[in-house]
Image (cartoon, rainbow, N blue to C red):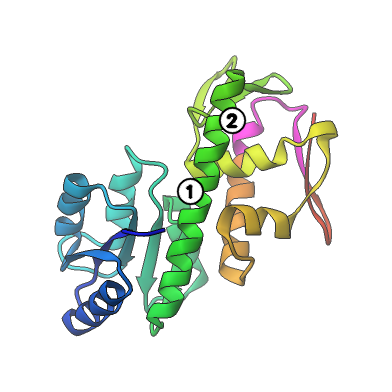
């Protein structure tokens, strides 16, 4: 994972420069932005590998930056870096489309570990996409057609566009013979870590997928207590 480009949006100047210098010492390329407006402009210009966004920023906050990025880009990993730690803020961030959440104060080493884990996840999704292209067939789940290439599910009622993370979770749940999938497996394969914040993120995505799959009432995404999940139809 050489030459990783990180867009770092942080309005605390001293902290921003410390993080940038620490990342650059480890061979990362860093695009530093002092506010959300710059972050959107630089994202569109350079298309970085990952975005690390402070939530509370001048002009446009990190949540709004993520919303605008996710309008056209479901794949590029987004990490929120913030002192806000209430559960509702964490959940809000994940629902917008964030991939991870890092609380201040933090170590640069932890940030690097999380960046690399997210990029491994992205690579896994890319490999899934390549395999699906080779098969050239969407997956049939009950009366729903799931296309992991386009990140869509189709039903008579219409087409739903999934985020890359939703698509990756659903793909893992589409096991032969409708086998159950352990939570830990989902977290390790898709998030790269089974810590408590990623576990909460998984809960959010499972809830969203259940809503998406309601188009076919015969489909059930079952929570198997102490084990994980099973998709049945």
Quarter location, residue 7: bottom left
Residue at 51% of width from left, 22% of height from top? Answer: 159
Within 10 Å of disc 2 (Cα), the crowding (few <14, some 14-19, many 20+) is few
For the residue pair 216 and 51, the one nearer the viewer reads as 51
Q: Residue 40, position in %: x, y? A: 20, 52
First-in-chain label (1 vs 2): 1
Quarter location, residue 155: top right
| Residue position marked by numbered label 1 in the rendering | 122
Whether residue 148 is visible here, answered yes or no, is: no
Q: Residue 21, position in %: x, y? A: 23, 78
Left or right placement of residue 49 versus residue 180 in this view: left
For the residue pair 174 and 93, the one nearer the viewer reads as 174
Left or right placement of residue 147 versus residue 180 in this view: left
For label 2, the SS is helix
Please, is residue 125 above or below residue 146 in the view? below
Residue at 20% of width from left, 57% of height from top? Answer: 39
> Magenta part of the protein: which range?
211-222
Which mark is on residue 91? none
Within 10 Å of disc 1 (Cα), the crowding (few <14, some 14-19, many 20+) is many
Quarter location, residue 230: top right
Q: Residue 163, position in %: x, y? A: 47, 40
Please identify, in this view, whether the residue under mark 1 or under mark 2 is nearer the observer: 2
Residue at 36% of width from left, 59% of height from top? Answer: 2
| Residue position marked by numbered label 2 in the rendering | 131
- Quarter of the picture containing the C terminus is top right
């Amino acid at each position: 994972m050489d030459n990783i480009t990180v867009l770092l949006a942080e309005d605390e100047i001293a902290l921003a420069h410390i993080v940038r210098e620490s990342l650059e010492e480890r061979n990362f390329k860093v695009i530093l932005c002092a506010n959300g407006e710059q972050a959107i402009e630089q994202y569109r210009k350079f298309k970085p590998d990952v975005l690390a966004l402070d939530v509370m920023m001048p002009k446009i906050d990190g949540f709004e930056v993520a919303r605008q990025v996710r309008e056209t880009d479901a794949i590029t990993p987004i990490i929120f870096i913030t002192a806000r730690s209430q559960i509702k803020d964490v959940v809000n961030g994940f629902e917008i489309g964030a991939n991870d959440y890092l609380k201040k104060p933090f170590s640069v080493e932890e940030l690097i570990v999380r960046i690399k884990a997210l990029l491994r996840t992205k690579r896994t999704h890319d490999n899934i996409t390549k395999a699906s292209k080779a098969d050239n067939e969407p997956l049939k789940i009950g009366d729903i057609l799931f296309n992991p290439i386009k990140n869509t599910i189709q039903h008579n009622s219409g087409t739903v566009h999934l985020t890359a993370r939703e698509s990756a979770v659903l793909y893992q749940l589409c096991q032969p013979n409708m086998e159950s999938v352990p939570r830990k497996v989902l977290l390790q394969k898709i998030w790269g870590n089974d810590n408590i914040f990623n576990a909460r993120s998984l809960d959010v995505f499972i809830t969203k997928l259940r809503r998406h799959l309601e188009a076919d009432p015969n489909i059930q995404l079952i929570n198997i207590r102490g084990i994980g999940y099973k998709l049945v139809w």
